[in-house]
Image: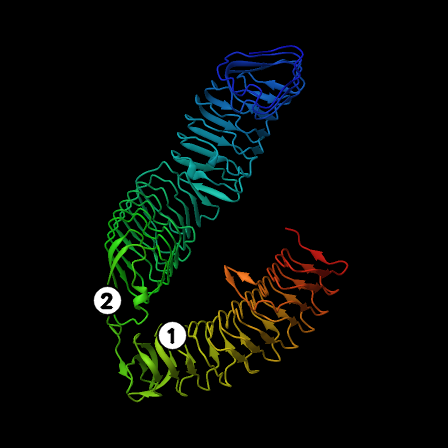
């Protein structure tokens, strides 16, 4: 290939398709070589003195075997004795020849390694990048199939996704300098045996070639190439770095509170996550093809999609007791899984959970009927067992879910292990209770889940005065419709009546000062009377109300978040001395029309009225300072999630008070009926997307000096 005299520029893709050239002669008139200019493998390349610009991708799809030779008179480029191409001052390493072999030490003048500069150097076995280098572009190493050792000096802080963009299949030793503050994608190094880091690094440390946080509480990365058994050291609380490892067994001790991703550990046969683990947000054993048994910590509530997918030998799974949600495809292609038992607290089973589980034949539910996606058991033929006395298992729950399922009930002794039980006369309700001999008092701890109708809890049982309803005591008693709590009771535990879907009326006695979180969540109460003694209501305590009118009395002073969320309320009166409407208070009250706001109001919390589609126009009181993120999002949204809310056309205006200073992110997002807004003079900040989606807004008046947050 001869580029003759008179040619000044070799353009983009000029010789990209010329794959057979082995020799090249670049004329003395050429000044510029553009990206992707060549596509051949050349023996060597001579750069004449005239060249002033070589794009870093000029030889991206070409190659040079022996090296680059730059005319000494060239003012812009140079080479070293190995034929490596640099800029003139050797601060940028541009490209190395394919025949670069053995060990190469980057000159100490170099500050930058350019993309793909070592790509294809398959004879290179060791690369040393000195302390002068401060930047390694993300594809600098490309493919170096026989590199065994890589050393990166103290000048580099972060290489981004360098290791995900390179192919170093035989790299065994990785030495990193003191400057690193972020190291990612080490799971892309399949053969690495040792990860060593400078003892002067302030973020990381290494022990026996394993990468930890500086204080050794986080195991950041275990070398992928190691096999055998590894015991997590005492003192480690977070285990992250086992993705794609060849390790056969990992022993995780009590005391570890967080585990990460184990996917692709193809030699792993068994894994037990201790109960001390409560954080497993990114936990997965996907494609652990030899994994046969796994037991997961009882502290984990949710399993993500694909968590166990591709575990083709998995036969036994012990799910955590607190597990509430299993996401889609969680057990995809677990072809050896024949049976599974779901914990009592399971609430959601997403779509295609058991896709490809061709041998699954037995499924046992131990609690109330969860939400089951229509495709959860697609192509599965199995017998599904459910507790006989649980009234939530209705006929509509026992369908095929795109599989071939047979549903059978089994007997459950709800009161096994309980010392004291009492059957309430003239009802089908049996109560378990605990006694205190010293005070002659009793705590109700459980009610049979198939109790129905009206229930008056006795004020005394066998001579013991009933003073407390324990946590979750009546949980998911879906047949109860009316419950009277005796005046002797002074405490009601958290989630005491959660999920009692038919419970329309509850009598709460005087003396109760606090309704704890989720106490009556999901009950669907159609009437509600607050005792005068009540001072505090916890998070989501009354969500899912079916009543339409609500007046909150003055004596209630402390409100949790979401207390009336997801309800059917239409008209609400708030206490006159209320200063804050907490987060999510009326979220998803789709048919809420009117709310009487107190003059004492100072803040409206995040999503306080979000998705109140039929909310009427409002005048916010003087004294209000802050409107939280998404506080009124989708109020007046006419079409939402495919549903048409015909009454969602009343939220046409909001009068903001002169005292207002802050409007949060998406505060009025998708308020489709809102036509105009006047921003008061004292408003200091309008956060991003505050009025995004207000399609019918025609007038906006802004004060001078207001800060509008940019995206």
Which SS class for mark 1?
loop
Task: Name the residue nearer the viewer: 531 or 371.
Answer: 371
Residue 162 placed where, x, y %? 50, 35
Residue at point 47%, 32% (across, down) = 166
Which SS class for mark 2?
strand
Outermost residue on the right side: it is 704
Q: Which residue is mark 1?
A: 500
User: In the rendered image of this protein, does residue 299 appear above or below residue 355?
Assistant: below
Would residue 578 be seen by someone viewing this image from the given angle?
A: yes
Dot 2 or dot 1, earlier in sequence:
2
User: In the rendered image of this protein, does residue 209 appear above or below residue 55?
Assistant: below
Q: CA distance from mark 2 to mark 1?
A: 21 Å
Q: How many marks?
A: 2
Task: Name the residue nearer the viewer: 322 or 501.
Answer: 501
Instruction: Give the left or right position of residue 183, taking residue 11 as reference.
Output: left
Instruction: Give the left or right position of residue 685, taking residue 518 as reference.
Output: right
Residue 340 placed where, x, y %? 27, 56
Around disc 1, counting alpha carbons within 10 Å, would you say few (fewer than 14), some (14 to 19), or many (20 or more)?
Answer: many
- Quarter of the figure that contains the N terminus: top right
Q: Which residue is mark 2?
A: 409
Quadrant of residue 592 within the rendered picture? bottom right
Around disc 2, counting alpha carbons within 10 Å, would you say few (fewer than 14), some (14 to 19), or many (20 or more)?
Answer: some
Task: Name the residue nearer the viewer: 302 or 152.
Answer: 302
Q: Which numbered tag is attached to residue 27?
A: none
């Amino acid at each position: 290939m001869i580029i003759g005299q008179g040619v000044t520029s070799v353009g983009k893709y000029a010789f990209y398709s010329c794959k057979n050239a082995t020799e090249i002669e670049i004329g003395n008139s050429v000044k510029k070589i553009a990206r992707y200019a060549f596509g051949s493998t050349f023996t060597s390349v001579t750069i004449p003195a005239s060249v002033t610009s070589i794009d870093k991708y000029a030889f991206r799809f070409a190659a040079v075997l022996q090296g680059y030779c730059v005319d000494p008179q060239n003012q812009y480029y140079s080479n070293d004795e190995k034929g490596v191409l640099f800029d003139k001052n050797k601060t940028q390493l541009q490209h190395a020849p394919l025949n670069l072999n053995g060990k190469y030490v980057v000159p100490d003048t170099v500050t930058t390694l350019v993309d793909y500069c070592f790509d294809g150097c398959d004879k290179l076995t060791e690369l040393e990048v000195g302390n002068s280098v401060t930047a390694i572009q993300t594809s600098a190493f490309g493919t170096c199939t026989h590199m065994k050792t890589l050393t990166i000096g103290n000048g580099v802080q972060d290489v981004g996704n360098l290791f995900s963009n390179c192919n170093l299949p035989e790299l065994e030793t990785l030495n990193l300098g003191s400057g690193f503050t972020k190291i990612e994608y080490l799971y892309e190094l399949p053969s690495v045996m040792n990860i060593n880091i400078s003892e002067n690094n302030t973020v990381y440390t290494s022990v026996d070639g394993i990468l930890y946080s500086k204080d050794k509480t986080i195991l950041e990365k275990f070398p992928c190439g190691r096999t055998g058994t590894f015991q997590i050291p005492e003192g480690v609380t977070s285990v992250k770095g086992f993705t794609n490892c060849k390790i056969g067994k990992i022993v995780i001790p009590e005391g570890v509170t967080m585990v990460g991703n184990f996917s692709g550990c193809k030699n792993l046969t068994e894994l037990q996550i201790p109960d001390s683990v409560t954080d497993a947000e990114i936990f997965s054993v996907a494609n652990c093809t030899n994994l046969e048994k796994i037991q997961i910590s009882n502290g984990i509530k949710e399993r993500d999609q694909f968590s166990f997918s591709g575990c083709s030998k998995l036969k036994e799974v012990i799910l955590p007791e607190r597990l509430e949600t299993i996401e889609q495809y969680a057990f995809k292609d677990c072809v050896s899984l024949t049976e599974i038992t779901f914990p009592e607290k399971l609430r959601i089973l997403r779509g295609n959970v058991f896709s490809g589980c061709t041998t699954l034949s037995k499924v046992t539910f131990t609690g109330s009927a969860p939400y089951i996606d229509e495709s959860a058991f697609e192509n599965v033929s199995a017998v599904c067992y459910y507790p006989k006395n649980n009234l939530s298992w209705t006929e509509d729950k026992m369908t095929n879910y795109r599989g071939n399922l047979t549903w059978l009930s089994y007997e459950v002794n709800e009161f096994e292990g309980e010392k004291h039980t009492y059957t309430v006369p003239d009802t089908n309700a049996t109560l378990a209770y605990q006694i205190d001999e010293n005070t002659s008092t009793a705590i109700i701890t459980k009610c049979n889940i198939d109790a129905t109708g009206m229930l008056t809890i006795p004020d005394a049982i066998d001579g013991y005065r009933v003073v407390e309803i324990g946590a979750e005591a009546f949980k998911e008693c879906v047949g109860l419709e009316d419950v009277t709590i005796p005046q002797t009771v002074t405490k009601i535990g958290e989630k005491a009546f959660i999920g009692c879907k038919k419970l329309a009326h509850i009598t709460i006695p005087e003396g109760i000062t606090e309704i704890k979180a989720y106490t009556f969540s999901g009950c669907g109460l159609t009437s509600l009377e607050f005792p005068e003694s009540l001072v505090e209501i916890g998070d989501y305590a009354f969500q899912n109300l079916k009543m339409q009118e609500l007046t909150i009395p003055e004596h209630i002073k402390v409100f949790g978040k979401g207390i009336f969320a997801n309800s059917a309320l239409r008209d609400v009166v708030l206490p006159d001395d209320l200063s804050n409407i907490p987060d999510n208070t009326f979220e998803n009250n789709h048919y809420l029309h009117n709310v009487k706001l107190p003059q004492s109001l100072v803040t409206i919390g995040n999503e306080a009225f979000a998705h109140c589609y039929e909310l009427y126009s409002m005048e916010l009181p003087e004294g209000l300072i802050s409107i939280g993120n998404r506080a009124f999002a989708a109020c007046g949204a006419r079409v939402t999630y495919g549903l048409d809310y015909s009454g969602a056309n009343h939220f046409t205006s909001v009068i903001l008070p002169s005292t207002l200073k802050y409007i949060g992110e998406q505060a009025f997002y998708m308020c489709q009926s809102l036509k105009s807004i006047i921003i008061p003079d004292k408003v200091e900040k309008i956060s991003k997307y505050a009025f995004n989606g207000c399609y019918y807004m025609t007038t906006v008046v802004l004060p001078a000096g207001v800060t509008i947050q940019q995206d």
